[in-house]
Image (tube, coloured by chain):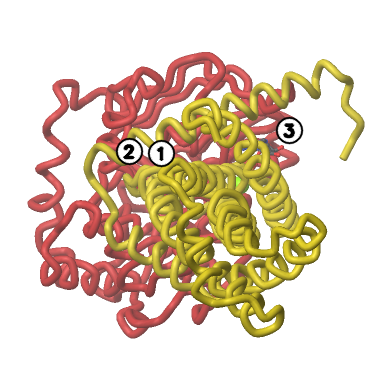
Chain colours: A yellow, B red
């Protein structure tokens, strides 16, 4: 890549943000009007939801395990080992479940979307689609957006659940904590606000994954090399966005629920 | 007579006779310019294509031939100038109107641009499926279109299983399935061997002589252009035949026009006669 002067660089970035906003806006607007591509929505749901299930369960489970191990060591110092269940549950539901799921699905599906749409772009399939009377945003982006937001919501619940199960198994079998009091402490610590916070985040992450993945795919240029570049950019940008937006949502939620 | 010859007008007429100015040019460019990243690609291009005419676009690689076709289909937006297709100013159309206009235009892309994830039948039927044509009718029309390009046997194959020439044929079938009023061929013979190229040009000719569809044919092969100009599709043999030199056409198709582009400008626009007689040094060198 050639070195750009700062003002050209900034202009390019602003143009990209503008393009991204237009794409996202249209993708959302197309949800509310016909035609809708149900077959594509279900295909994407299958690929995003069912396809990501194993990695979400595994990563959620082991995160819960390691969280229990770490918390016990830390809580011992304060003589608060009985709080382990509560700590694991709160961390999983409010923070780790949503963020981890977002990052995992971003690595898997933002990359997948960018490379699929990118190769369609460089082989003129996207132009062909437009020439044949189909709006590629409606046909390609909107189904991915709907499917990602919908599936990420449930994947997050599954990750939270796997994490709590993992934490419980470690706490009970390796650390010798009492199972029923552990679960009681987990359960009673979760309040309405925590759950709302934990389930608001995947809606944003899902939106970021689908729109960023499709955005980089649809603007791919430069042949197969360009497809590789688009894929990398999509994963990097969506992952960073997910973490930034996670912070913002957390701050807002603390404002609303006070915790 | 092959069945696709029986009544060429009856099925396409619904779309043809609607516009009030039916003798207006099908495609009209007026001072059209476009550039990418500050680099001009086409500069003040003006020309028009009459109904039933075949315009062959010639020029060296990278001179903007594909860009010109994409402008004609509204896939790219010009920086200045006006483009009218079927009398409608394409830059002024809204998203939905533009898609409605494109329903009347067939386009064959440079590298075929078939959908990898769909088999030949679904590729060819793509537009019909979008228009929710009933499955039985769609299938019948796919078979008919594939017959036209002589590729019925490949109906269940996926694009990855086809040769370059076969992909190009499928792409033509996909473009003609809705009996478009205008066809844009982007380098239909690009990257093909000479024999396959000739069979593809024969299909372009067949479409021209059977359905009289207005078309823009981009090519970098001069030979393609001269085959198109000097031959006519012969329904009796299913192949092409030379126009007789002593016939009414003097051996060349009068409905054909040529447009030569170089460095974003029109170097020549005229008939085959005028082309071979041209005094322009660049044209002369190009023809050699
Ligand atoms: N979408 C685009 N973005 C940037 N540059 C483009 C784009 N499309 C075409 N170009 C440039 O325009 C010029 C003409 O391209 P093209 O029309 O494909 O040439 P050809 O006559 O070989 O078909 C080339 O220099 C190409 O790099
Ligand atoms: Mg080209």
> Which residue lies under the disc numbered 1?
A27
Residue at (63% x, 59% y) in the render: A83
Instruction: Residue at the far right: name it.
Output: A3
Vertical order, A87 against B51 (above or below): below
Instruction: Residue at the far front: name it.
Output: A79
Q: In terms of secondary structure, where does tag 3 sit? A: helix
> Which residue lies under the disc numbered 2?
A30
> In this view of the protein, which residue sits in the foreground, A191 or B11?
A191
Q: Are marks 1 and 2 in contact (CB under 8 Å)?
A: yes
Closest to the camera, between mark 1 and mark 3, is: 1
> In this view of the protein, which residue sits in the foreground, B26 or A86?
A86
Residue at (53% x, 41% y) in the render: B57
Q: Position of residue A69 (x, y in %)?
A: 74, 70
Q: Are marks 1 and 3 in contact (CB under 8 Å)?
A: no
Q: Position of residue B37 (x, y in %)?
A: 72, 26
Q: Position of residue A242 (x, y in %)?
A: 62, 44
Q: Is residue B211 left or right of residue B278?
A: left
Closest to the camera, between mark 3 and mark 2, is: 2
Q: Position of residue B104 (x, y in %)?
A: 26, 42
Instruction: Please give the chain letter of the residue carrying mark 3.
Output: B
Q: Are marks 3 and 2 in contact (CB under 8 Å)?
A: no
Task: Find the distance from the CA under tag 1 to the CA under tag 3.
Answer: 48 Å
Instruction: Please give the chain letter of the residue carrying mark 1.
Output: A
Label 1 C-beta lies within 8 Å of the nearest ligand 1 atom? no
Task: Find the distance from the CA under tag 1 to the CA under tag 2.
Answer: 5 Å
Q: Are marks 1 and 3 on the same chain?
A: no
Q: In terms of secondary structure, where does tag 1 sit? A: helix
């Amino acid at each position: 890549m050639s070195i750009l002067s700062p003002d050209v660089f900034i202009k390019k970035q602003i143009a990209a943000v503008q393009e991204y906003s237009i794409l996202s806006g249209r993708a959302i607007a197309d949800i509310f009007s016909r035609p809708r591509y149900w077959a594509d929505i279900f295909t994407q749901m299958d690929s995003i939801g069912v396809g990501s299930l194993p990695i979400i369960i595994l990563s959620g489970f082991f995160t819960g395990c390691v969280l229990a191990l770490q918390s016990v060591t830390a809580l011992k110092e304060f003589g608060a080992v009985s709080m382990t269940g509560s700590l694991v549950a709160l961390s999983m539901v409010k923070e780790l479940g949503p963020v981890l799921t977002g990052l995992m699905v971003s690595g898997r599906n933002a990359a997948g979307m960018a490379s699929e749409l990118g190769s369609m772009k460089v082989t003129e399939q996207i132009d062909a689609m437009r020439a044949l009377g189909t709006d590629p945003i409606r046909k390609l982006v909107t189904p991915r957006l709907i499917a990602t937001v919908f599936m990420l919501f449930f994947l997050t619940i599954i990750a939270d659940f796997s994490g709590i199960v993992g934490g419980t198994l470690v706490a009970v079998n390796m650390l010798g904590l009492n199972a029923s009091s552990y679960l009681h402490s987990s359960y009673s610590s979760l309040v309405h606000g925590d759950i709302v916070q934990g389930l608001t985040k995947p809606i944003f992450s899902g939106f970021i994954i689908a729109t960023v993945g499709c955005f980089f795919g649809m603007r791919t240029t430069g042949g197969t090399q360009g497809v590789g570049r688009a894929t990398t950019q999509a994963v990097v940008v969506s992952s960073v966005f997910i973490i930034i937006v996670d912070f913002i949502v957390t701050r807002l939620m603390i404002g609303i629920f006070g915790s | 007579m092959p069945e696709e010859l029986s009544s060429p007008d009856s099925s396409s007429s619904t779309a043809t006779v609607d516009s009030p100015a039916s003798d207006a040019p099908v495609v009209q460019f007026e001072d059209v310019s476009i550039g990418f990243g500050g680099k001009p690609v086409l500069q003040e291009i003006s020309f028009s294509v009459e109904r039933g005419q075949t315009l062959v676009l010639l020029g060296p690689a990278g001179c903007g031939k594909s860009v010109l076709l994409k402008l004609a289909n509204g896939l790219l937006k010009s920086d200045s100038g006006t483009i009218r297709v079927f009398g409608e100013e394409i830059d002024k159309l809204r998203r939905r109107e533009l898609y409605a206009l494109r329903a009347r235009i067939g386009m064959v892309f440079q590298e075929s641009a078939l959908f990898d994830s769909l088999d030949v039948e679904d590729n060819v039927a793509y537009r019909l499926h979008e228009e929710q044509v009933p499955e039985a009718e769609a299938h019948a029309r796919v078979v008919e279109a594939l017959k036209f390009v002589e590729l019925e046997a490949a109906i269940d194959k996926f694009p990855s299983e086809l040769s370059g020439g076969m992909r190009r044929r499928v792409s033509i079938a996909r473009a003609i399935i809705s009996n478009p009023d205008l066809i844009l061929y982007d380098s239909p013979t690009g990257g093909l061997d000479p024999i396959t190229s000739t069979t593809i040009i024969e299909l372009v000719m067949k479409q021209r002589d059977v359905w009289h569809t207005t078309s823009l044919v981009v090519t970098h092969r001069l030979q393609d252009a001269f085959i198109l100009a000097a031959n006519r599709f012969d329904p009796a043999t299913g192949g092409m035949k030379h126009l007789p030199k002593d016939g009414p056409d003097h051996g060349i198709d009068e409905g054909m026009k040529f447009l030569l582009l170089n460095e974003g400008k029109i170097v020549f626009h005229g008939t085959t006669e005028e082309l071979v007689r041209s005094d322009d040094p660049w044209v002369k060198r190009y023809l050699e």
